[in-house]
Image (spheres, helix red, strand yellow):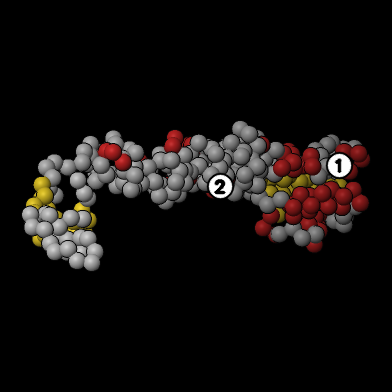
Amino acid sequence: MRPNLYGGVGLNLRINSWISLGVMTGFIYPFTDLIDGTEGAVVTAPNSYNDIFQENSIYLTFTPGKAKDSDNDGVPDKIDECPDTPEGVMVDEKGCPLDTDKDGVPDYLDECPAIPGLAEFNGCPDTDGDGIPDKDDACPEVAGLKIHKGCPDTDGDGVPDKDDRCPDTPKGYEVDRFGCPVDRDRDGIIDSEDDCPDEPGVAELKGCPYDVGTLMAKYGLNNKNILFDFDKSELKTGGITTLNGIAAALTNHDGFGVELSGYTDYIGAKAYNMKLSERRVNSAADYLVGKGVQKTKIKTMFFGEDNPVEDNSTKEGRALNRRVDYKLIKMK
């Protein structure tokens, strides 16, 4: 038995997934000339006229069935590293679901497929580590609270820091929608420190307004009358001191006024005493105006020798009846 040499070229055309048409031409060179049963002439070298054959062929190839692909992802099971991929999921050349951001969460399960994230948040990141994924976090760079969509509330007043105009409000203070302590009466004293939160007041009275009593106490007014010498309307040192206190109270505090009432003792004609009491009360009123008190805050009355406070039959009593009474009033 002797071997033969064979060589050729061909073309294979696939008709469908399981039928192919082939065309081939080839040459056979045997190492003997007896293939056709006739021995050739012997010349200078043995086998120099050995038989050579050309072979042409047309053929059909049948390949029934196809490679198994359990998950129908287009990658045969024999090379599919993820053979249980759900139907319709896009896969790579290894048959595994695509993972664009390489975070270990396949794109079809990844709510943030273009940004590396965490499996516990379906592939989304949590930059500030507060347990709220960035996609749901209104403050993704700062750890916060779920109730505030991931934003912090430093002073715990229920208003997140990003909306809080007063982020250092003491604990327990009632605040408005801007996170600032409530001041209902707008007197500059917050309700939590205001003893009179519904009425404008002053800090020195813990948010309560002045009344006549507190105002008089502040300026040392004790209802002592403004006294005059006999048959005089000029102010004395004691009266000036009292009027200075009244002026200070009225110029420093809106809403207050004063009632001045002029009197005399019973010596002299009644008509004369009436005029004298008028001059005395006007003297006190003019002094207050000179100290900056508005005229609208001053009410004057005069009664002559009526309404004595002491006995006119004594020198001491008459000295006390020559007077101007004052009364601080709350104006409407």
Q: Is residue 53 above or below residue 128?
A: below
Mark 1, other Cα within 10 Å: few <14 / some 14–19 / many ≥20: many
In the image, what residue occupies the spot 77% across and 42% down?
216
Kind of element beneath mark 1? helix
- Residue projecting furthest to the bottom: 44
Q: Amino acid at mark 1?
A: Leu
Is residue 231 something that shows in the picture? Answer: no
Most foreground residue, 130 or 269: 130
Q: Is residue 21 above or below residue 207?
A: below
Is residue 315 something that shows in the picture? Answer: yes
Say left or right for 135 vs 46: right
- Mark 2 or 1, closer to the camera: 2
Report which residue position mark 1 lands on: 320
In the image, what residue occupies the spot 81% across and 45% down?
219
Q: Earlier in the sequence, mark 2 or mark 1?
A: 2
- Where residue 218 sits in the image (x, y, percent)? 79, 42
Q: Are marks 2 and 1 in contact (CB under 8 Å)?
A: no
In the image, what residue occupies the spot 28% across and 38% down?
78
Please identify the quarter of the rendering in which residue 29 is found.
bottom left
Report which residue position mark 2 lands on: 141
Most foreground residue, 163 or 139: 139
Please tell me the numbered disc located at residue 55.
none
Rounded to the nearest whole Å, what is the CA distance between mark 2 and mark 1?
Answer: 80 Å
Say left or right for 264 vs 69: right
- Where residue 300 sits in the image (x, y, percent)? 71, 53
Say left or right for 314 vs 44: right
